[in-house]
Amino acid sequence: MDRLSRTTEILRDLIAFPTISSDSNQALIAYAANLLEDCGARVDIVTSPCGTKANLFATLGPERDGGILLSGHSDVVPVADQDWSSDPFEMVERDARLYGRGTCDMKGFIAATLAMAPQFASQVRERPLHFALTYDEEVGCLGAQHLAQTLQARSLTPRVAIIGEPTEMRVIEGHKGCYEYSTHFHGLEGHGSAPDLGVNAVEFAVQYVSRLLDLKEKLRGMAPAKTRFDPPWTTVNVGALNGGVAHNVIASKARVDWEMRPVQGGDADFVKAALQQFCDVELLPKMQAIYGEASIHLEIVGEIAGLIPADENEARRIVMELTGANDADVVAFGTEAGIFQALGTDVVVCGPGSIEQAHKADEYLSLDQLSAGLAMLDRLGGELEMQSE
């Protein structure tokens, strides 16, 4: 079986695992572990704190610092309320495209690394090659943060990390951060005919959203003078506002789900400080004047640092050589890359597929893109044979 066919076969198996972030990924992790163990890798499976998910970290070659890490997340976004042409968890090949949830984001890259593992096993010399599969990237990069803690506890730092998110094989050296929150409002229920006797959580949540939108506009004028991001400013998005039970009942609870994508750390501090002051000075006093136990609570879903472009970056040099790229770019979407960079690892993001297909109905990965990803990994194997430290 040729390399592309083997990768497609593995990808078909990976797609069949419905690893939506709300569900377990352990069956997929066990499947990948078996493939890696079969080619001689040392495999560690680290269970999540909740006990239903796991990270995988595997190594070919010596157990020491300075290795190269190939990393991908195993979870996918939901398919509910999306109009798919076929079963999203049964991969379909059509018009030189592979359709299924996760083909692009990012099981295609994972399948390629697993298909290449036997070849890598024969090529690794003094420099170790690591494989990482994480959980819950789509809901706050929780698995990657857990993995970073695991590596720190083992005093193991890869020198280079390649995060295989879909970039159409462009070399990405920087991206914005991703900060996700849920703000909870607790008021006092009552009859809609007597609004002054209750504390309407939805109404205060609306005022909070209004303040968020004001800050969103202010951030447009705070873009750094020299930035390569598009858009160049920190963005804010209100994803959902939930609350209330009926037309004639004063809502006692409400929740605002929102995010921001900072281009610089100070922007996140600015937004959070402004919102805290707004709550402390304006909203909470009004709420508690009627009901002393009224509250506003900011839940941090995830605060994922961006990937900061660096003057010296071995990962950038290696992957540019492997892909033939003449330069490296930046993107607006977030990845786990900043978590690995914080460990002291040189990181780039580069993988098959386009982010334009991610998270959508009829998500797909073209065979051309998958072949390009395999070609990069094949050349990486050749570099492993030559490298020593």
Image (spheres, grey):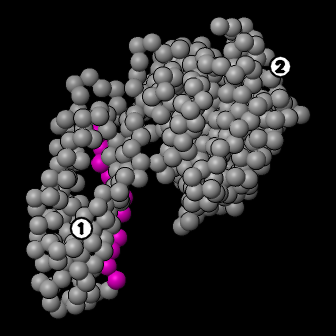
- The quarter of the image holding the N terminus is top right
In percent of the image, x 64 and y 57: which residue is there?
52
Percent position of residue 227, x then y: 30, 26
Residue pictured at 35% horizontal, 50% vertical? 259
State the image quarter where residue 333 is shown: top left
| Residue positioned 57% across, 25% down in the render | 155
Residue 83 seen in this snapshot: yes
Indicate the position of residue 338 as horizontal and vertical percent values: 45, 32
Start-end of magenta stretch: 234-245
Location of residue 354 with respect to 62 vertically, above or below: below
Magenta span includes 241: yes
- Residue 178, position as x, y percentages in the image: 39, 43
Say which residue appears at 35% left-offset and 31% top-offset.
Answer: 229
Q: Is residue 255 above or below residue 19?
A: below
**Closer-to-camera residue (95/243):** 243
Amino acid type at image mark 1: Ser
Task: Return the disc, 1 or 2, that comes first in the chain's sequence.
Answer: 2
| C-alpha span from label 1 to label 2 | 60 Å
Magenta span: chief secondary structure: strand
Vertical order, 250 against 27 (above or below): below
In the picture, measured across the screen, residue 125 lies left or right of residue 329, that is right
How dense is the environment of label 2, judged by Cα within 10 Å: few (below 14), some, or many (20 and up)?
Answer: some
User: In what element is the residue under mark 2?
Assistant: helix
Q: Is residue 31 magenta?
A: no
* Relative image position of residue 191 (x, y in whole percent): 22, 90
Q: Which residue is mark 2?
A: 122
| Residue tagged 1 | 295
The kind of residue on which mark 2 rests is Ser
